[in-house]
Amino acid sequence: MYNILLLVCIITIIQSKLKVIRPSNLINEHIDYSIANFGIIPFGHRLMGTVDMAYPSNGCSDLLPTYGAHFILIERGDCTFVTKVRNAENAGYKLAIIGNYNDDPIQSDFAMADDGHGYQVTIPSIFIKKKHFTQLQDKANNYKVEDSNDEKIMMLLKFDVVKSDVISVIFGLNVQDRESYRIVDEFEPFYNKLESQNMNYTLVYSIMSFHSSYDSSQQQNSDCICQNRYCAFDPDGPAIGTGRDVVYEVLRQTCLFQKYPKKWFGYMDQFNFKCSRPQAYSACSQQVLDMLEIPKNEIQQCVDASFIDQYTQQQTKNETNAINTLLEQQLYIQQVAGMNGFPSVLVNSLAYRGQFSGSGIFGEICNSFLTTPVECSAFVDEYQPPVLEQSNILYIIIITAFVIFFLLLGFCVFRKFIERDSKMVTQPQVNEMVSQYIKFYEGKDKQKEGTI
Ligand SMILES: *[C@@H]1O[C@H](CO)[C@@H](O)[C@H](O)[C@H]1NC(C)=O
Ligand SMILES: *[C@@H]1O[C@H](CO)[C@@H](O)[C@H](O)[C@H]1NC(C)=O
């Protein structure tokens, strides 16, 4: 049973890749791609369309408006990815396919980056190897934008999700970054919407470790706790705040989310609004907790309980030999999940790509359920793509021939019927006309006779 399930999974994943549908023999191997970090990505959805080559091929200036083709091929280089994709969108395309200038493997963690103007782009874009790009380009150079779409390359792309019953969502956040708070704020209504679903949320904050197990005489860095095991970037340079203030705030936010996840959203909002000086994070945090009527001591207990002496395995207040269980987990996830940069979001271990918005993340979550919950019905696409394999084309021809045959048959029967019908109706009329004509003629003859 499990083998069958596994097989089904593998097939689904393979099918969900980028594929050339027409001409069917153009590229038969796997086309790896990575998705840009900007644009609105229709997770779990499929896009099918015909393909044009950009002119100019680097896509750095205005492009000819599309005549109904959906995808456009653009070469890498000379200007930012965002510029290229924006030009493609302005020309009416629904997807930009950017070709690399080499055949380096497409790393799953590589993403075309936002140049700061990515918010202006709404279409998705993908990045492929030079080899595949050239094969598409050579074919697409045989036709022009204004040519019939029937002659163009047709491709299908499905934006991957990993489906499961329990959805794991990892939020990568940075205490000192406004963007992190914005995403949390935007996601709150969707968090509430998904409350009845099987979700596993994990917070991972931007922390790092400078600990050296070889050098026990290492000086404690002022941006670190626990002998440099857990550190954060100095938040304000030479000013008084330190990375330690940030690390302790990470612990408070992590504990709050564990104990009162729904209150955490309100806390994040207030903390972002009120607490700007890192040296005052601790005092400011207490005020916000009071304001939201969250039991401060419970949060403190959770923080205290996370420091464990590595030899005795007991809770400890002496940080010298302490390990922090919460922060260890976050460092571990950072490593294994391949998170790059903060903020970031992983849904079922796949990095969320595209514009960071609450509804975007919700869309990806929705498409990751094995059985779509009702809350998600508007976000999920059940459409199955038509597969135009050789045998199917034969099938279509046979069906079309049948349809034409029956139409012709119907037409003949109909015509026979009309003919018979009109004969029956017109015969007496014709007879009458003929007899009138004869009478008229006879009359005329008589007249003739009379005049002459
Ligand atoms: C939830 O996710 C975390 C981190 O990804 C993982 O360690 C944990 O086992 C998951 N819990 C459940 C119940 O799946
Ligand atoms: C903490 O533990 C270390 C190592 O066991 C010890 O040398 C140090 O004196 C302790 N510090 C305090 C404040 O107890």
Image: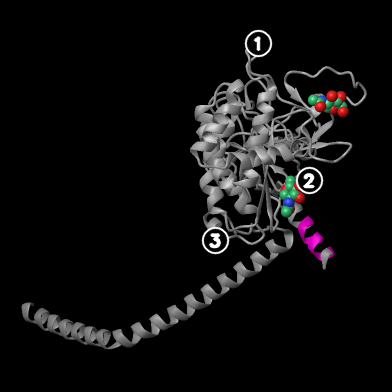
Picture coordinates of residue 30, whole percent (x, y): 78, 45
Residue range corresponding to the magenta coloring? 3-10
> Magenta segment: does it hold 6?
yes
Q: Marks 2 and 3: which is nearer the front?
A: 3
Q: Please, what secondary structure does the residue beneath circle 2 have?
A: loop
Type of the residue with mark 3 = Val
According to the picture, the residue beneath numbered tag 1 turns out to be: 238
Q: CA distance from mark 2 to mark 3?
A: 34 Å
Q: Viewer-proximal residue, 115 or 413?
A: 115
Q: Is residue 20 left or right of residue 54?
A: right
| Disc sitting over residue 30 in the figure | 2
| Disc sitting over residue 428 in the figure | none
**Badges 2 and 3: C-beta atoms under 8 Å apart?**
no
**Dot 2 or dot 1, earlier in sequence:** 2
Type of the residue with mark 1 = Pro
> Magenta segment: does it hold 125?
no
Picture coordinates of residue 418, whole percent (x, y): 39, 80
Residue 401 visible: yes
According to the picture, the residue beneath numbered tag 3 turns out to be: 374
- Tell me which image quadrant ligand 2 sits in: top right
